[in-house]
Amino acid sequence: MIAHGVLASLAFVIFFPFGAISIRLFSFPGLLWFHAIVQVVAYLLFIAAFGIGIYLATQIHRLDQAHPVIGIVLFILIFFQPVLGYMHHRLFKKYKRRTFWSHAHIWLGRIIITLGIINGGLGLDLANNSRKGEIAYGVVAGIVYLVYIISIFVGESKRRRDRKAAVRAEAEPKRSDSDSNDSHAPGLRTNYYA
């Protein structure tokens, strides 16, 4: 039971949120691969936790409880994230904007992280964990979730700022050196709107 709780907590309270935060706030070469690797590590941790959890739930006949049911739903949903992430990245590079696949990947990730953190609390309750253990989990998970939510707003704000700057840069006319040195017609800029 401890192994299940630790592995699942590492996945949903540490690695999944950190991978999501990193893609929004960090900027370095290879960031996409860093994000993908962190998320794969989280997924592998959750697969191990899921296997242990299913075994425990069947042994104590609690498979119908909210905690294992949400765990099964999460296991199914997470399966789609790598495919959605690949489609998001591929089409974003092609169209330079978010597509259906982008929104599906982003929102499914948000739902998964939120449900995973909530489910950790339900698991502690199901396991009759100590009050101190529940409080410790709640504090750590709450802080991480708050940082995660803030990173969403900061990341989206940065994205809007970058898009506006890119639109302004495209809208500004491009002038060659010969245009700027054209003094035979004051006030007239040849090829200005080309």
Image: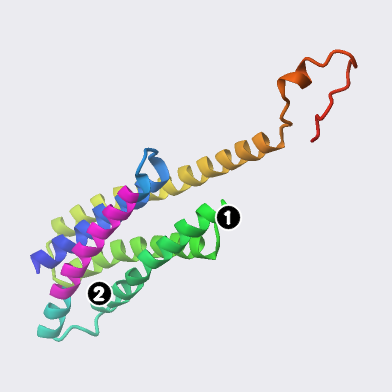
Q: Which residue is painted at 13% across and 65% down in the image?
A: 129
Query: Which three-letter amino acid code belongs to the residue tagged 2?
Result: His
- Name the quadrant containing residue 62: bottom left
Please state which of residues 152 and 193 is positioned toward the viewer in this rendering: 193
Q: Position of residue 102 (x, y in %)?
A: 49, 60
Question: Which range of residues does the magenta coloring cover?
Answer: 33-52
Q: Quadrant of the C terminus?
A: top right
Distance, label 2 to label 1, CA atoms, is 40 Å
- Point out the tag, 2 or 1, that comes first from the N-terminus: 2
Query: Which three-letter amino acid code belongs to the residue tagged 1?
Result: Tyr
- Name the quadrant containing residue 111: bottom left
Residue 45 part of the magenta segment: yes
The disc placed on residue 95 is: 1
Which type of secondary structure does the marked residue at label 2 adopt?
Answer: helix
Q: Can residue 145 be seen in the rendering of this structure?
A: no
Q: Which residue is painted at 90% across and 17% down in the image?
A: 185
Q: Position of residue 54 (x, y in %)?
A: 17, 79
Q: Is residue 111 above or below residue 183?
A: below
The disc placed on residue 137 is: none
Query: Residue under circle 2?
Result: 67
